[in-house]
Image: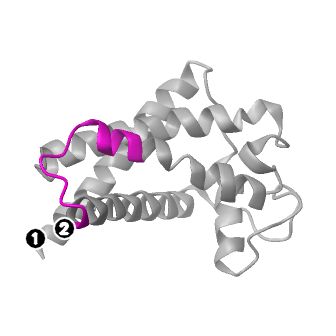
């Protein structure tokens, strides 16, 4: 049970670091992203089996409030942290180099690029999305911040260095 709680803590910390990094980049005007209410709306649509919509901004469904979106966001971050842990344990990567979680975090960029953006009607890699959302740049830099969070969590929370 202690390990499960430790893994959940690592997932939350990794996602918090992602959010802090993304917030700083957003404040500097470097990234933007799709509004959370539309991402949440798409997540709920996908959970109901409707993964691909023409345009999430006009698709049927309700706007998801920020607190509910954040629950989804942290569940996803924690699930990805658990996935990385399972990979590391299965492949017996020990000691764990700092760049493995960092690269895994960057690799998670493919989730929005190949699934979420097309599902929202914004095309592969977000190329059909509103230019002001800076979708691909936002995804890459946010997921790099997630990778940093994973590297920190795996070193200091999970002590896998």
Q: Residue at x 27, y 41 (%)?
A: 151
Judge by depth and name the residue closer to the eye, 15 or 144: 144
17 lies above or below 65: above
Residue 161: quarter of image? top left
Q: From the viewer's perspective, tell me whether residue 118 is left or right of residue 66.
A: right
Give the CA distance from mark 2 to mark 1: 5 Å
Q: What residue sits right under mark 2 in the picture?
A: 5
Q: Is residue 110 rendered magenta in the image?
A: no
- Which sits in the foreground, 13 or 146? 146
Q: Is residue 100 magenta?
A: yes
Read off the residue under disc 1: 2
Q: Are marks 2 and 1 in contact (CB under 8 Å)?
A: yes
Residue 126, compared with residue 12, is above or below; it is above
In the image, the segment drawn in magenta is 90-104
Please provide percent x and percent y for residue 87: 30, 62
Number of dots carrying numbers = 2
**Label 2: how many residues lie within 10 Å, few (<14), some (14-19) or many (20+)?**
few
Residue 34 is drawn in which quadrant? top right
Q: In the figure, 17 relative to 1: above or below?
A: above
């Amino acid at each position: 049970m202690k390990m499960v709680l430790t893994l959940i803590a690592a997932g939350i910390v990794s996602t918090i670091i992602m959010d802090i990094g993304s917030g700083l980049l957003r404040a500097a005007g470097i990234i933007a992203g799709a509004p959370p209410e539309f991402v949440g709306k798409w997540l709920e649509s996908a959970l109901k089996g409707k993964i691909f919509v023409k345009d999430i901004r006009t698709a049927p469904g309700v706007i998801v409030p920020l607190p509910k979106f954040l629950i989804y966001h942290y569940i996803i971050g924690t699930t990805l942290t658990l996935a990385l842990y399972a990979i590391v344990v299965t492949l017996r990567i020990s000691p764990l180099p700092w760049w493995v979680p960092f690269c895994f975090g960057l690799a998670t960029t493919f989730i929005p690029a190949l699934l979420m953006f097309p599902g929202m009607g914004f095309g592969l890699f977000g190329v059909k999305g509103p230019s002001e959302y800076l979708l691909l740049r936002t995804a890459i830099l946010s997921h790099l911040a997630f990778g940093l969070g994973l590297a920190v969590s795996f070193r200091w929370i999970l002590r896998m260095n």
